[in-house]
Image (cartoon, grey):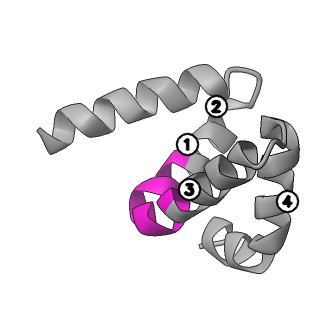
Amino acid sequence: MSFFKNFLMKKLLKSKMKDIPEAEQEKMLNAIEKNPDFFQNIASEVQAKMKEGKDQMTATMEVMQKHQDELKKIMNN
């Protein structure tokens, strides 16, 4: 089940990142696989901001800025 879930997640994320170079896509997917709880928390925070009435881009940018130091650490590993 876990393999199937990971496969679907990768397919979904790749479709959302189609304009991003392949190497960057892989780097991001690896970071998500290694830190699933952190990225789940980010997704939850984005959803909460969207429920407050913010559009997806604004909500995402606010959450990413809030967690930018942690993101830098994760992406540089």
Which residue, as the protein is rendered here, is positioned at the far front? 52
Query: What element does badge 3 sit on?
Result: helix
N-terminal of the pair, mark 1 or mark 4, is: 1
Q: Nearer the viewer, residue 42 or 13?
A: 42
> Separation of disc 1 and disc 4 at Cα?
24 Å
Callout 4 crowding tier (Cα within 10 Å): few <14, some 14–19, many ≥20 = some
- Residue 22 - label: 2
Callouts 2 and 1 close, C-beta under 8 Å: yes
Give the labeled residue for mark 4.
62
- Sequence order check: which comes first, mark 3 or mark 1? 1
8 vs 44, nearest the viewer: 44
Camera-near label (3 vs 1) is: 3
| Residue with the mark numbered 3 | 44
Give the residue at x 17% y 44%.
Answer: 2
Question: Which residue appears at 88% of the width and 45% of the height?
Answer: 58
Identity, as a three-letter code, of the amino acid under mark 4: Glu
Image marks 1 and 4: residues in contact by CB distance under 8 Å: no
Q: Amino acid at mark 3?
A: Ser
What SS does tag 2 mark? helix
Q: Is residue 6 above or below residue 68?
A: above
34 sits left or right of 13 in the view: left
Binning the other alpha carbons within 10 Å of mark 3 as few (below 14), some (14 to 19) or many (20 upward) gives few
Residue 57 is left or right of residue 9, and the answer is right
Q: Residue furthest left?
A: 1
User: Which residue bears the numbered disc 1?
Assistant: 26
**Of the residues shown, which amino acid type is indicated by label 1?**
Glu
Look at discs 1 and 4 and give the one toward the viewer: 4
Q: Mark 2 vs mark 4: give the one in front.
A: 4
